[in-house]
Each structure stands twice: as C-alpha cells, then as structure tokens.
Image: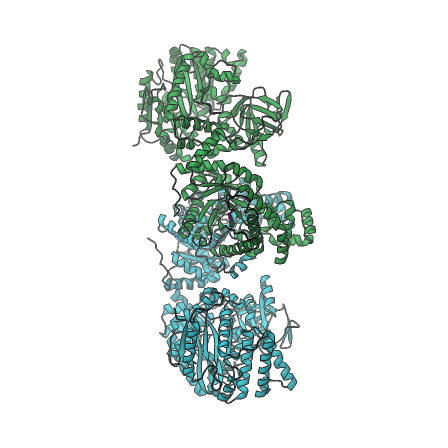
Chain colours: A cyan, B green
Amino acid sequence: MSKNVYAFGGGSAEGRVEMRNLLGGKGANLAEMSSLGLPVPPGFTITTEVCTHYTQNGSVYPEGLVDEVNTALAMVEDIIGARFGDPDNPLLVSVRSGARASMPGMMDTVLNLGLNDETVTGLAAASGDERFAYDSYRRFIQMYGDVVLGVEHHNFETILADHKDEHGYSLDTDLTAADWKTIAAAFKAKVEKALGEPFPMDPHEQLWGAVSAVFGSWMNDRAKIYRRLHDIPEEWGTAVNVQSMVFGNMGNTSATGVCFTRNPSTGENAFYGEFLVNAQGEDVVAGIRTPQPLTLAEKDLGHSNLPAMEEVMPEIFGELCDVREKLENHYKDMQDMEFTVQQNKLWMLQTRNGKRTAKASFKIAVEMADGGLITKEEAIKRIDPAALDQLLHPTLDPNAPRNLLGKGLPASPGAASGKVAFSAHEAEELAAKGEKAILVRVETSPEDIGGMHAAQGILTTRGGMTSHAAVVARGMGRPCVAGAGDIRVDYQAQKLTASGQTVNAGDIITIDGSRGDVMLGPVETIQPELTGDFGILMSWVDEVRTMGVRTNAETPEDAKTAVKFGAEGIGLCRTEHMFFDPARIINMREMILAGDEAGRRSALAKLLPYQRDDFTELFSIMKGLPVTVRLLDPPLHEFLPTKDEEMEEVAQAAGATVEEVRARAAALHESNPMLGLRGCRLGIMYPEIYEMQCRAIFEAVASVSNDFGKTVVPEVMIPLVGSKKEFDILKEMVDRVAIDVASETGIQLTYLTGTMVELPRAALRAGEIAEGAEFFSFGTNDLTQTTFGLSRDDSSAFLETYVNQDIFEKDPFVTIDQEGVGELVHLAAERGRATRPDVKLGICGEHGGDPASVHFCQTVGLDYVSCSPYRVPIARLAAAQAALAGAKQKVVA
Amino acid sequence: MSKNVYAFGGGSAEGRVEMRNLLGGKGANLAEMSSLGLPVPPGFTITTEVCTHYTQNGSVYPEGLVDEVNTALAMVEDIIGARFGDPDNPLLVSVRSGARASMPGMMDTVLNLGLNDETVTGLAAASGDERFAYDSYRRFIQMYGDVVLGVEHHNFETILADHKDEHGYSLDTDLTAADWKTIAAAFKAKVEKALGEPFPMDPHEQLWGAVSAVFGSWMNDRAKIYRRLHDIPEEWGTAVNVQSMVFGNMGNTSATGVCFTRNPSTGENAFYGEFLVNAQGEDVVAGIRTPQPLTLAEKDLGHSNLPAMEEVMPEIFGELCDVREKLENHYKDMQDMEFTVQQNKLWMLQTRNGKRTAKASFKIAVEMADGGLITKEEAIKRIDPAALDQLLHPTLDPNAPRNLLGKGLPASPGAASGKVAFSAHEAEELAAKGEKAILVRVETSPEDIGGMHAAQGILTTRGGMTSHAAVVARGMGRPCVAGAGDIRVDYQAQKLTASGQTVNAGDIITIDGSRGDVMLGPVETIQPELTGDFGILMSWVDEVRTMGVRTNAETPEDAKTAVKFGAEGIGLCRTEHMFFDPARIINMREMILAGDEAGRRSALAKLLPYQRDDFTELFSIMKGLPVTVRLLDPPLHEFLPTKDEEMEEVAQAAGATVEEVRARAAALHESNPMLGLRGCRLGIMYPEIYEMQCRAIFEAVASVSNDFGKTVVPEVMIPLVGSKKEFDILKEMVDRVAIDVASETGIQLTYLTGTMVELPRAALRAGEIAEGAEFFSFGTNDLTQTTFGLSRDDSSAFLETYVNQDIFEKDPFVTIDQEGVGELVHLAAERGRATRPDVKLGICGEHGGDPASVHFCQTVGLDYVSCSPYRVPIARLAAAQAALAGAKQKVVA
C-alpha cells in the first residue's frame, strides 16, 4: 500500500519540494518551507494519486486513506494543541486544492472547517471575540454550502441583505455578534430547506465532504478549460491540502497579504507586495477591497496612498524580509508568497515560483545569472518562449497623442486596442468574427476565462495587482489595466463613462498595461526594443543552440523584420503570394486561361520580370544568407475570380469571353483541392511555369552576384513530391534552366535542389528521394492534414469537441503530433540521411515557431527550423532550451 | 565482358528456354526447339541487355557486339551453306523483336534482309523463280524503307498502284518478273529521292539498320501503350532475333501457318490452326487473305469451306502433328506455333504458350491436371485471374429473340452490347462519357489498341481467328467477332449495312464472340454457368488458399450474387447507401436539418426500422457468415440536395424554409470533404446517429437469432479512425447499445468491434488502437488518397500523364502501391498483432479484387480480402496463386 498522506508542520515535513508531482505545487512547497523552519501552519497533503484513483474509480477512495488522514490529523492537533471538534478548544482547518501546476481560482476551497454549533463557542472563547467567531461560522456555512452542498451563494446573500435591510444596516461591519449568530442559524436553515437534511455538524463528515468537493472540482468545466489553455494534462490530478486555520481577520494586529521577492511586472530586484489589515486571504485575491502596499518604496512610486506594511507592522515586515531572502536563495527563483498575520504572529501559507511578465523574466534571469545565483544555462531555461510573444510586438508610441480616459494599475504589460466588450461572451463573439476586443469588467471571475483569452486586453475597475484579472492576464500574456476606479461601467446600458466621456460597447479603446493608461480610440505604436536584458539573454541563447533558425517570408518587410529578429535565412519563400499583386494577377490569370503551352509561355514571359525583381530584392535583403524558394504550390483555380464582376474584368483583360473564363474556372474546379492538381503536379503538367520561376531565381542570383561578399546560394524547393520520379523529372528541369542562365549571364551558379516532405509517401520513400534531393523541408502543415486525413479549413467544425474530449491533446496544427506525424518526420530524416548523410533538414510548417514542436525538431536532429518573423526569437530560445534539455544531438556523418 | 549473342540451329543452341529474360520469349523458344531437334531455321538472338544498354546510352551498342554478331552469322552461313551478300548463293535473314512477354504487332520486323541488286539474281537462280526473287526484293525495299528509313508505306503503294493502272493490271498476281524488277528500281529511286542518299546495298549496313530499328521500336508509342495496358516494365527491353529466311511463298508446295496444340477459344483438346498456301507468314496474321483450316475436323464444324491442310499436304500435316505432341509434352502447356513450308520442307519459326480465353484456360488446366501432365497446383497457376472477369458476367440468352445482322468468326468469347463506334477515337470518347461502345472496323491495327481497350467488344469484317483484332481481343478479355464478311462498313458515311439493314454510328448492336453472331439492338442475358471445369478448378483453388474471400455488398442482390460466387462473408457493408432510397432520404435530410440532438433523434427514430430491416435481410441471406457493417461514413452534405427544386421539396417535407435548408447546406459545405467531418468524426459529434445504427444492427441480429443454426456475429466497423481515443469512445457507445438491446430482447449478443485503417495515422498508431479494436479492415482507397495526398476524384486531370511518364507504374487506385501505401499496411498489421496477436485483418478497398494486390495481402498475412461480388472468384483464384507462390504465410499465434 502506497503512502497517500504527507504531513508537515512544527519544523519538519514528510514531503519535499521535489515531490511536486505527488503533492502538487502548494503541498510540496508547504512541506519544503516547513523543513526550512519557516512558520507554516501544520497540516497534511492528500496526494494527486488519490485524485486519479478517485476520478477513475467512480469517486471511491483507496483503502486505508481514512486511517492515514486520522493519523495526520492527530499530529496536527498535537502541534497546535487543539482538537478537531473539541467544543472548548477546537482545531479549524482549511481544505484547498494544489495541482502540479498553478491553476489560480480554478478549483474549490473551504475555510474554517471544523466549526459547528458547539465548536463556535470554543472559537469565541479562544479568540475572545464572539463576533469574529460567528462571522467565521456563517462564512464557513456559506462556503461549504456552496462548494460542497451545491447551495449557491445568492441564497445566502439574500438572507444577509434582508437582515441588513430589516435592521437598517448598510455595511457588514455594522453587524454585531448576535446578528451573525442569527444569520448563521438562518444559513443553516436555508441549507436544510434546500437539501432536506440538516447542515452537517460532524467535523469529520465536513472534512470528507470538502476533500471530495476539491477532488471533484478537478473535473469541473472551468478547470478543464484552464488546463486546455495551459496544456495541463488531465492525468496529473490535484492534491488536497488540509491545514490548520490561521486568521488574518482577528482585529488590527492581524493581516493577510501576497508578496513577490522581485517585481513580477518589471523584474526589478525590489520586494513587492500587497496586504490588507484585518482580512482573510481571499479578500486580497478577490479584489473586493483595494489593498495596501508592502513597502514604502512602492508607495513612493505613487501607485498607492494607503499606508505600507513597512510602516504599520515594521517588525512583521522585517520577519517577512528575512523569509524573502531565505526563500529566494533556497529556490533560486523569484517567489510568490502568501502570508497571514494572526495577532502579530507571521504565518507563511504558500510559496511558489512567481508568474512574471516576459520583460520581467528576462531581467530576473539576467540579473540572477550575473549575480551568480544561477548559471547562464539556467537563465535560458527560465524564460517561457510562449510568453515572449508579447515582448516582440509593437508597443504604444509614448509620444503619440493620447485621449486619456483614466488610469489604473499596470497589471500586465503590453498595449492593445480593440472594441469594448462588457462580457466574456461578447468578447468571444467579436474574436470569432476576427475582430479585436477589450474585455471591460468591474472585476473578473473564473467564469470569464474564455472571454479573457479571446480578448486582446483586459480592463477592470476594481481589484489590485494580484486580483484575478491581473494574475490571469499575466499568465496569458494579455495586457491588463486593473482597478481603474475612476472609470464607471454600466453593464445594463452597455457603456462606460470616464473623464466626462461616454464609451459604448463596440467603440474602440486602447489600454497600456505597462503604465496603467486607458485611452479612447487607437494609439500609434512603435517597434519593440530588442536590446538590454533581452539582447543579453538572446546572445547566450545563440551560443547554446545547435539548430539554425530561419523565417518564412516572401515580402521585403517580413524579410527585414525577420533579419532584425535574428533569422539566419529564409526557410520558406512562397512564390505564389507574389502573384496576387493587382499588376500581376492579370498575367497570372491570362496564363491560366491560355488554352495551350504557347499561350501560357507568352503570359509567363510577362510575369518573369516581376518575379525576378522580387527575388533580387529578397536576396539583397538577405545578403548571402540561404533562401529557400518554393516553386508554385496552390491549385491554379485559387488565382481565378469567383464573382461575376471580377469574371468580366478578367475576361476583358485576357481577351476572352466571360463564358470562356467561367468554363475554365469550372474545368479547374476540384472536389478536394488539397489533394488535387497542385504542387509539383503543376510542374509536371505545365513545366513552363516552373521553368519561368527557376529562370527568375537564377537571373536574380546573377544580378546580385557582385553586390556583397558572399555568394548567393538559392535553395530551390519542389513542393508536394510523393515519389522519386517526380523529383528527378523536375530537378532535371531546374538543372537545365540553371545551365541556360549560367551560359547566358556568364555567372557561375551554385544552388541546392530539394523538396518539401509533406506527404506520408514522401516520408516513407525519403530514402530514394534523397538520391536526388539535397535538402528536405518538412511541410508539417500539409503532413498533418494528410496523416490525420484532416483538412485544416474544415476541421474547426469539430476540433474544439476533439480537444475537449481529449481526443487531441492539443490542436495538431499548432503543436506537432509527435506520435503520428512525428514518426513520419523521424523516419524520413533517418531514411534521407541513410542515403545522403549530409542531406540538409529543416521544417517550414507553422510548427517551426511552436516551442514544443521546436523541441521535437531537436530530437530529430533537424538542421534548422523556419517560422514567421515575429516568432523567430521564440524559436531561437526554444531551440536553445531544447539543446540544454539534452535532446539528442544532430547525427551527421 | 558478358555474352551478348546466342546462336541456334542445326540441332543445337547456346540458349535455353529458361533464359527467357535474356533472350526474350521468341529467342528462348527458338533455342529450345533447336535443342529438341525440331527443324528451326538457324539464326541468333541479340539479348535484352543489349536493348537496355542501347536505350540508356544514347543508341550506342556495347563493345564487341559487332564481332559477336559476325561470329554467329558465320555459323548460320555454315549451317545453311549460303553466304551473306554472296551474289551467287546469298543468305537472307529476318530481323524480329522478341520481348520477355509477347507483344504481338507492337514492334518492328524486317524480312528478306540481305537482298540487293546483286544478290537478287542469286536468289532468282537458287529458287529458279525470277518473279519471286524480284517480288521479294521489292517487298524488302518497301519494308526496310518504312521500318528502318522512315519512308512510309503509302509512298510505295502509290508507285505500285500507278504501275498497275498504267499496265491495266488489277491483281498483284498479274505482275511479271520484269514488272517487279521495274517496281523495285522505282522503290529504290523513291527512297533515294526522299532521303537524299541511295538505298543501302551493303547487307551488313542493312543488318545493323534493322537491328537498331527493332531496338528503337521498344520505345515507340504503340509499344509503350501496350506495355502499360499489360503491366510490362520498360526495363525488360526486347531481344532481337536474326534468323535465316525460309519462304512460304515459293509456289504451291510452299505455305505458312499458325497453329495451337489445343483450341484456344474453347480449350478443347483438338489440333487447331490456319494456313495459307504460297504466302509469307505476315499474310496470315494481317488478315488480308482469309486462311484455310488446318484439320478436317475443323472444316467439318462448318467454320470454313476451304480445303484443310490435312487434305492438301497430308505428309507435312503429319510432321506437324508430331511437332504438336512433342512440344506440348515438353512445355506441358498449350502451344501457339508458327510454321512455314518451303517447297515441301517444314520449318518451325516459333512456339510459345498460347493465349486462350478464360473458358479455355479452365478446360485446358483441368484436363491437363486430370491427364497427369501437370499437377493441380500447376493447373491453378495456369489461370490468369484478370482474364476470369469475362467468364463471370452474364452472357446472351440463347433463347432470346435476336435480330441477326450477320455472322463472323467467334474470335473471342463473351457477349457485349454498345453503341457502334467506327474509330478507336470514337470508342474512347464514348467510354470517357461512361457509355458502352462496340468498335467496328474493317480490320484493326496496333494504332487501335486504345479504342479496343475502351470498347466493350470488337467487330471486324476482315481477318481470321489469328488476326490482330482476334489476338488482341482475347488478350484483353474483350468479346470479338472477326471477319464478318457480309457486313459492309462505310467509314465516310459513318454506317454499316448488313442483311438489308443500315446501322448508324451511335446505334446499339450486340456481338456474341462465342458464336460469331452480330445482332441489332440489345439482347437479353443470362447468368454465367459456374459448374463444369470452372467449378472443378475453383474447388482446387479453395483447398489451396489460406486467405478468406469476402464481398463488399449492401443490397440483397449483391449479397446473393456474391454468395453464389463463393463469398465467405461480407467484408464491407456501406450503411450510407441504404439511406439514398427515396422513402428514406427524406428522414435522413430531416435528421441533418435538425437544429439539435432532439430533432436528430426524432428523425433517426424514423430511419431505425428501415435500417433494421436492411440488416435483417442481409443476415438472412448470409446465414451466419460474418458481416462487417461500417457505420455512417460520408459527410452529411452528400445527402442534401443541390438543385433549387429539390431544396424546396426537402424544405416542405422537413417543415423548414428553403432559406433554412440552403443555410444548413452552406454551413455543411467543406473545402475538402474528403478530409472533413465524416467517418467516426460524425460519430463523435452526433453520437445519436451511430447509436441508431448499432441499435438497428443488434435488433436485426436478435430478430434472426432463431432462423438458422449458426449465431450471427456482426462485426461493427468504425470508419476513419485516426487515434485510439476516437475508437475507445465509440466502442464504449457500441457496447452500451449492445447491452441495452440484449436486455430489451433477452437475446445474448456476440459481436466484434473494429476499425477501418484508412489514414496514415491509424496505421502508425495501430498498436494502441488494437488495444480496443478486435479487427482492422484496410480501407486502401482512402489510405491511398491520404498517403499520396491524391484525391481520386480529381486525379484524372493528371493521372494519365503520371502513368505515361512512368511516375506511377500503375494507377495506385487499381493496384496497391506496395512501396508507400503497402509499407503502412505492413506496419499496421505488425503493430496490431504485437498488441493483439489474433486481431482479425482484412482489406475492403477496391484493391481486394485486384490480383496483384491480393498477392500483396498474402505477403502481409491478412485473414481475408473483400471485393465486389463479380470479383469474388478472381480474388479466390488470386489468393490461391499467392499461397502457392510461397508468399509468406500468415503469422498468428
């Protein structure tokens, strides 16, 4: 029988921080803090394995669990010197979830457990505060009633409101001990009426009810959505932490707070946090009262005019500073801690690695490495590549005119503009239509997760830096301004008012999460700063990684951006995009409408100069870096018009009748264009098209051959190859055109000819295809489509259901399916190398910019990944992390 | 240096029959006949390796070839006692192709080579017939001019016609020696004028010219098309046979003929052949003169009223009968022989295994096995499964009224009706439109191959049983009536006249190739006879094969036909076909148009009784044989109407507006339906559909459970599975419905649940899918589409080019691509068995009825193949042959 319960407290613990998978993050850290001698309220953790057992066996617990819990509970009783259910000196506990990865607010919590009609008197006696005891009791009944028994909050709130009305009270603080006692009784009666049985008085029954509710909440919808958004597998399960209660609401010598060892927003090495006097912990996170700053320094920055903890509780603050130093040195990472002060005694309730903005993560990693706390390699590992995205996009121009509506807390950095949406649902609807939304709420709750994800940014009018909105927004990398109190939101009227201006739902506003500004209308942006901590860390990254990083680009703008972001070449230049320019599409259509080869050649001759100029410009920007040019790929009908007026236009320009254009379009129609006449099949059927493109490439190389020191070595890529013969026929064509251009220009041409590997058959036959092909570029978008038999365009109808039902762990178009598509990539790489040990291998599907997929590419030993320009730094970082993770190194003879 | 030339003649030979790959069929058999002591004109064979060398090295011969040829030539000269180029006693030779597989009429031949202005006088002296000598000379110039020098036939024919007009001659026989001399001179002058250089007089120059022309003809278009139709690889190459000439046209003691050791049409063990007195061999095959029968027995059958060889040349006939016996006993197979009689001396020019009709092949194989000449296994190997097709289809009802237009020779058995097409091109056009055509020609030539293939049957008005039309039609399995001389064809007017009736192009006629009848209009048919030789041999087949054979069927008619043909179960019952019935499609559309699950369930409830009845009927027909039912597979939009009036109808029936119907159809539209919401994805999205289908299956099983001795064990097949999870979710649903039906009916249900393997990912993940799946059925149609990224519906635009350019050896939708798709099948079988050693494996793509693919299935060790009803016997035979070929036996623990 395995051990299911791990106790902690009193300066020792059965668990360790390394047991995170078993104990969850909170439980492992409570154990670790306890072992470090920090003041942790004693308690115990029921493991994640119990959760899995409970979930998979119809809510049945493993044998022996009750005994283990009772043993641990007895130990807690001994340390605290109070007994569970003892009317004179009762032990009260909290019951909280604690998963392997933090899932703030997603699962259930029950506080003050152990109170009943008898023990409440004991609490009153022990605290010397009857009002506090009955307030705690009614809070417990409400929370337990809601979370465990399913009697919703509003039932209780109505009773409280009615009571206040009856007695003419306006604030909760107006209520006396007697009032709370009456209300607690009314709450109990309400539960009994709703359920048909009385509220449980037995603390053990209460305990098991709460534990089951927490385990059960692992499978609630909110938790499922959060896991999906954060790639947390269902199998992980959650642990349950049962811990003796400490109270931050026992008067003005009590308090509760949250703090970070460094600033989570900027990364600055300054103690940072918030607290509330005479409050329970949930009050800080819920954002109901605006919290006070921890330090005077913070107060001096002008973010608050409330007294700092440093001034009101200097001694406790000093103790907390010691804890800060001890924990950061122990964990060697920035910590996010929760504490409670109960009648001048500090208790540590939680520590964990703190979430931080991308900008802060760079500063913290670089400073810790410079300070010797961690190595450079460790610093690289600390950055979340996915979070990097927010750093790389344009930010608001500080000099641009701003129509300021109001100010709030700079809760999550970055800027965003979008239409005002007053509900999560509306934000999701706008996003579904491809529009940008800013979610505006008084405060957010876990139900809003979907809308927060769909929105470009979040604005709340209440709550602090650690409110739900702020924490979740930082985790998601969404800009957020929190607690902008001078903005008034009217959900009913679907408008907000601020600075005398009214903004309706659907109007555009801009928020600056780095400064806390809220502005009317859009604001001009500037390019991101790529120097400083970012530049330093990325230079370490480049020393470490073994894979190259290229970009997918065909426009000069994209190519320039990518070079600035550190791209080492172009991995995919899609030549068809070059034909959509209005000046060219006419010739393209003329080519397609031509009835014979001669007609096509004549139209292609007009396209040649355009395409040659495109390549010349790209080669000039890339200054000798490799450029992989993919020959025409999409079906020709994609270039034809579909609307009547366009048809007429084309007919006129091409000297054909509308009927001819329509007939040709109809003849080119395909049932499954994805699997039709496209890619190299076009090159086989109409060799003159590829000939023109190759000519354009080689003439462009010739024209820039003296422009810079390096030789331009283009890589000609033949798409959609499924067999050696297709490749060989087209390679012969490439070689023939190269010989022609070389002899016409007198320039010696060096180039590679290779293929996309984007069909299962190409992967299987890679060995023989590599006889001719000098490089493979894995086109994992199409390879995913064909391996799954899944059209990217059509899968949206069921993809969400598939992800929700865990059929797909992740959208396979975002993160490569390692088991299926990945096996084909592996196999193609192996077979290709067996034939041609130095065959150059890369990836140019959109997976090239996805960190998990980049990691996979390292295990396959690819030479490079290629991704969109803005993802180049992400790919560089992911490649370095993959190299550090000891992923199999490239095997090249 | 390898040996390039193999000599034969004079009772011995350097080659042997086993050297067919090197010497070609003709060369190997000439060598073998020579070794057997048969009278073979001496000669030598230049190997197929020389052809490959010549083709791949820019028409250059291997070193030393000239010396080898000269040595062999000297040997021939010694045996014959005549010298090449000797004016007094010249050796003349024929130069013919001879590939590994017979390709009648596809490549070039040159006869009488060695004649020039000097040697012609020697030939005149040696034969004592100056007219014969100059006739031979002009024939040589014409043939060499056409074949080697490229001066086309009509140039020479014009000269001959002009000469005849000038002198008032009507027949060739009117011309004298002097006339032929003049004409030979005119032919030479024509060649010199056309080419600017004289006709070659040097016999060695002539020889090498002819050899190169024959090798070159391996790559001509006709030969390429023939190879493609007959699956002959280009790499095989052809050999060239140079053989001393013998003359069947040296007066009335000379003759030439073709004979078969048994009747190639019926298989009867009777000597059978045709000959012409005073003629060269090509005259028989070309069908210009109607030939005489070989035996009196044949004459007695009334097929000819010309004198038989048995009566006009009894001694030679006796010698030929000895040769017949010797060769059939030696080769142990029916032989097709060519002979020439030169002035009362018999010469054997060729022997080969004779082509035969499917019916004849059964009779010959069974009789030879019964007679002990071959084993039963050998008999099985002798039948060409592809040729079987013609035996299995309905034939004309002999009692049905026939409007007889005329009679010809029963050249290739079977009956066919179709529209009259007077050119190969028209026949192809009709076929392309999906219409049936009968190709009607005076005679056919190799240029007509494409049209013969496209047509349902062939009718010629000239030529015998061994004419081009007859030979090719038998090879293709097309019914053919040849030499129907009382039918007049007018190409110009696009009509034929016979029995006083006129038939225009496009009118329907029927031909009966087994009787030689040609009829106006269609004629009623009867089902094929499956007893007799066919029944005997198929019973041997069933003893030998190790794979089961099932059928793809969903209608009662198909199921009954398949059972009659020996199907051992249903391998694929496509349930969607059951919904297209007008009475049901309305409910199906109602289901699709329903906005929610409740609406769908209500429509499905109406479909349930239909579907249950369908299954009940199928199970009753199959009487306990296994039935694999595939749950709904196609995208729902396939069931929706596309035309406006249909839309209205559906709207009315479904109680919806036309706009709603249109909107729903639009919402269901997919860019690539092949890769969209279909197969098990429907089952995941709309579980109620699959639930209804499973209920129908299980209720049907319950309803027939007492009808016959065997339990009905349905196999429920889930289509388009790509991952274990999909399968598991749906298997759980199947099990749930089974439990419900079992408890409702009180009948114990036994069933299997399995999946189609039709996606590359399913093949790759077969190991884990087999944890739940009890069987795999390879859906190789879709697996081919996804592995190649090739839509079957759209590939016709380029498939022909791909086959012509040898990118695809064969259409991968007809014969399984062993290298690509086949590897996935192999891998899935291996991984599936590793998980579940007894996982049942089958194939239900159309490849299941293709002999080459069946052979592949044997190597993979599948349990069964499944194919369309009419292909069941083909699959049985192919499976037996595969088992005999020693293909790897099934490995099942």
Q: Residue furthest bottom?
A: A128
Vertical position of residue A172 compared to residue A237: above or below? below
Q: From the top left corner, tell me how far across and down residue B215 is, in percent.
A: 40, 29
Vertical position of residue A502 compared to residue B562: above or below? below
Vertical position of residue A214 compared to residue A279: above or below? above
Q: Residue furthest left?
A: B1
Q: Is residue A219 visible?
A: yes
Q: From the top left corner, tell me how far across and down residue B112 is, in percent.
A: 41, 19
Looking at the picture, tell me which residue is in the foreground, A212 or B539. Answer: B539
Q: From the top left corner, tell me how far across and down residue B465 is, in percent.
A: 50, 22
Q: If the image is split into quadrants, where does the N terminus of chain A sit? A: bottom left
Name the chief secondary structure element in magenta. loop
Residue shown at 52%/69% (left/top)?
A478
Looking at the picture, tell me which residue is in the foreground, B515 or B806. Answer: B515
Q: How many marks?
A: 0
The residue range painted magenta reads B705-715
Q: Is residue A270 magenta?
A: no
Q: From the top left corner, tell me how far across and down residue B777 is, in percent.
A: 48, 47
Q: Is residue A758 visible?
A: no
Vertical position of residue A444 compared to residue A661: above or below? below
